Image (cartoon, grey):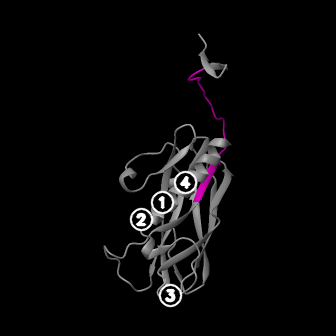
Amino acid sequence: MKLWRGVVTGVVLAVLTVQSLAMPAFAATTPAPTAGAGQGLEISPPLIQQNVDPGQTITLNIRLRNVTTGELVTTGSVDDFVAQGEEGQPKLLVGKNADEVSPYTFKPWVGEIPSLDLVPQEAKTAAITVAVPKDASPGGHYGVIRFTASPAGSAVTSVSLSASIGTLVLLNVSGKVVTKASIAELYAMQDGKKGQFL
């Protein structure tokens, strides 16, 4: 449980880090609606955690709201992340990490993510199908479904960068899971000093 908490907290921070690269063009939090406020989305839920069976097809409903004063068009994508270190710090597999393969991916299972046109303050739900393969390995499979917004009718150029906002998806596939652990170090403290066991 501690590992999952670390992964979830860290991924939220990692997603916010990705967003900060293009903050002038996008506000991930809810900004006050003002003229020329840029691209801003609100997303719900921020986390989807669900148990699934091999061969099962589920639908994920993700709600987006346009919090700006202009019309927006959203596009979606799916990215993996992996946990690193003892605390489960996540690494999003985007940008320079995009070629890295996650053993816990669910990316190939995700169907088409619909584009949504949103007028100011409008909210719509994206229904996303996830088809779990019959031979899916048991245990956790996870990733991020991200949405990027751009002004309606605008051409995408190298200077009109938009960051994204996403929902973390944690799927637990049923089946027999083999868990292994090893002891890296064993010691006792005496008088504030660490003593090594033989």
Residue 21 picture location, percent across and down:
42, 65
Q: CA distance from mark 1 to mark 2?
A: 7 Å
Residue most toward the top? 198
Camera-side mark, 2 or 4: 2
* Image depth: mark 3 or mark 1 in front: 1
Report the amino acid beneath label 2. Answer: Leu
Q: Is residue 58 above or below residue 72?
A: above
Circles 3 and 1: CB atoms closer than 8 Å:
no
Q: Secondary structure at mark 2?
A: loop
Q: Is residue 191 left or right of residue 73?
A: right
Chain-order first, disc 2 or disc 4:
4
In the picture, residue 152 is in which quadrant?
Answer: bottom left
The residue tagged 4 is 11
Label disc, if present, on residue 21 of the rendered structure: 2
In three-dimensional space, the C-alpha distance between marks 3 and 1, rounded to whole angstroms, equals: 25 Å
Instruction: Name the element at disc 3.
Output: loop
Q: Earlier in the sequence, mark 4 or mark 3?
A: 4
Tell me how many marks there are. Answer: 4
Taking 26 as reference, is 177 above or below it? above
Q: Earlier in the sequence, mark 3 or mark 2?
A: 2
Is 34 left or right of 138, judged from the image as shown? left
On residue 70, the disc is 3
- The answer to the question of whether label 1 and label 2 lie on touching residues, with beta carbons closer than 8 A, is yes
Residue hosting label 1: 17
Which residue does the image show at 46% across and 65% down from the upper left? 20
Question: Mark 3: which amino acid?
Answer: Gly
Q: Nearer the viewer, residue 109 or 163?
A: 163
What range of the chain is rendered magenta? 168-186
Residue 178 is one of the magenta-drawn residues: yes
Q: Earlier in the sequence, mark 4 or mark 1?
A: 4
**Where does the image place residue 150, in percent across and percent down from the top left?**
44, 78
Q: Quadrant of the C terminus?
A: top right
